[in-house]
Image (cartoon, helix red, strand yellow):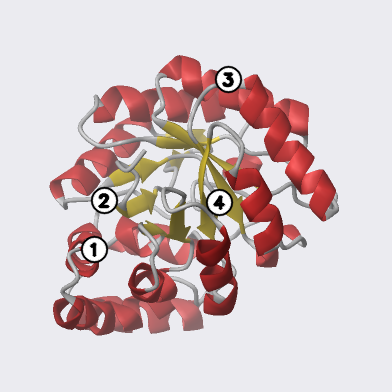
Amino acid sequence: MTQFKGAFVAIVTPFTDGKIDEKELIDLIEFQIAGGTHGIVPCGTTGESATMSHEEHQLVVELTIKTVNGRVPVIAGSGSNSTSETIELTRHAKEAGADGVLVITPYYNKPSQEGLFLHFKSVAEAVDIPIIMYNVPSRTGVNMLPATVARCAELANIAGIKEATGDLNQISEVIRLCPDDFIVMSGDDFTALATVAIGGKGVISVTSNVAPADMSGLMDAALAGDFAKARQFHYKLFPLIQAMFIDTNPVPAKTTLALMGKIKGANPRMPICDMSDATLAQLKKVITEYGLI
């Protein structure tokens, strides 16, 4: 399970004329691997999984696994706000050959802590694949508390958690309560270095979409204990990390990739829309200073 460490990219899903652009997705995966990314996460929040049909979701997972071809681990997003749907998507990810799955806490329903535990227990018992739980209260309306995470960590197949609370107090408590081999990954780029410093294993990153070499360099240095070098990467990346969230994720990342010539256009799916001219000007300034365009 220790292969899940370093900088994993929460890869965007490129759309052209409303459909998944398979060639662009393949090219983005190659760009990531060439940049030293440690793993690929298709169909996460950044991949716009919420507005993909099951057929599209399965296509993206299958194409990612085929393109990666074992070069780095693939953790496929397979979460939903329905436990039965989550099990269905997780089964597909296993059959497609994913190395693990990323399973979000059910959104909108607002389950209790017991409901969260039973959700993950049901998925873990139904499908024999390493599961990375995903806690992102700002998106889901529910926070999975450290004590609940620790209960889940005792279950077979629950390998770790992507912690996107941005709260080092909570992340520390999760690490303190869970077994040593439990994988804690930052779900916020700005806490990636700090999470590794307190015992985490890496980050599932938005910024890696546009700067894979620097984000993987940051994680390589931090995991090797070279915090002076890691800090240099952190502060180099910091304005870019902030810029990736000046509008709803993944709009800034997709817009940057379009400006870099990696995809034809941002083309986010409704109800996510293109950024305003004023926000675009802010983004262009940052990515020009960074040297991406």
Question: Badge 4: few (under 14), some or many (20 or more) residues near its Cα, within 10 Å?
Answer: many
Q: Which residue is mark 2?
A: 262
Label of residue 91 in the image = 3
Q: Which residue is mark 4?
A: 45
Question: Badge 2: few (under 14), some or many (20 or more) residues near its Cα, within 10 Å?
Answer: some
Q: Which residue is mark 1?
A: 223
Q: CA distance from mark 2 to mark 1?
A: 29 Å
Expressed as whole percent of the image width and height from the top left, the position of residue 49 reads 58, 42
Choose the circle earlier in sequence order: 4 or 3.
4
Question: Does residue 144 show up?
Answer: no
Kind of residue indicated by mark 3: Arg
Front residue (pair 199, 144): 199
Vertical side of 69 occupied by 6: above or below: below
Kind of residue indicated by mark 1: Leu
Q: CA distance from mark 1 to mark 3?
A: 32 Å
Kind of residue indicated by mark 2: Lys
Question: Does residue 47 show up?
Answer: yes
Q: Secondary structure at mark 2?
A: loop
Q: CA distance from mark 2 to mark 4?
A: 20 Å
